Image (spheres, helix red, strand yellow):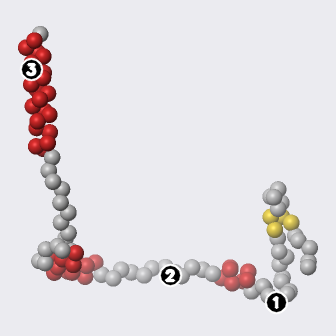
Amino acid sequence: MALRKVASVTLLGVFAATGPCLAGEQVYRPTNPTFGGNALNGSFLMSTAQAQGKGVKSGQQSPDLSGLTSALSGIGSGASQAPIVVIGGNGLPVVPASP
């Protein structure tokens, strides 16, 4: 019984002593030479960027504002074609009286 306790304490001590030995220092090393990396990486990074190209513009590049433009076209003219509808607190639409 005493031998088992001595063995377990010794084994626990060995594990506790080897724990810090397994840890290592982590140091940040930049890749880009602009930020302090190796100067020999510059040509590799440039060729990789050029091989990727500039990308492709696809689809519409600006939002579609045609609905907003038509909705705002009657503002200020005094004669709007569509009545203003306000949603009340109970969720039902209400048409306000003309000023």
User: Camera-side residue: 34 or 65?
Assistant: 34
Viewed as shown, does residue 58 lie left or right of 32? right
Q: Are marks 2 and 1 in contact (CB under 8 Å)?
A: no
- Mark drawn on residue 77: 1
Q: CA distance from mark 1 to mark 3?
A: 95 Å
**Identity of the residue drawn at 79% across and 88% down:** 76
Q: Please, which residue is most extreme toward the top here?
A: 1
Q: Is residue 53 above or below residue 8?
A: below
As shown in the figure, which amino acid type bears the numbered disc 2? Gln
Counting from the top left corner in percent of width and height, residue 81 is at 84, 82
Q: Which residue is mark 3?
A: 7
Determine which quarter of the picture holds residue 3. Answer: top left
Q: Is residue 40 above or below residue 5?
A: below
Quadrant of the frame with the C terminus: bottom right
Counting from the top left corner in percent of width and height, residue 42 is at 17, 79
Q: Indicate the secondary structure of the residue bearing disc 2.
A: loop
As shown in the figure, which amino acid type bears the numbered disc 1? Ser
Q: Please, which residue is most extreme toward the bottom here?
A: 77
> Visible in this render: residue 51?
no
**Identity of the residue drawn at 83% across and 74% down:** 84
As shown in the figure, which amino acid type bears the numbered disc 3? Ala
- Mark drawn on residue 17: none
Counting from the top left corner in percent of width and height, residue 35 is at 22, 75
**Identity of the residue drawn at 92% across and 73% down:** 97
Disc 3 versus disc 2: nearer the observer: 3
- Mark drawn on residue 61: 2
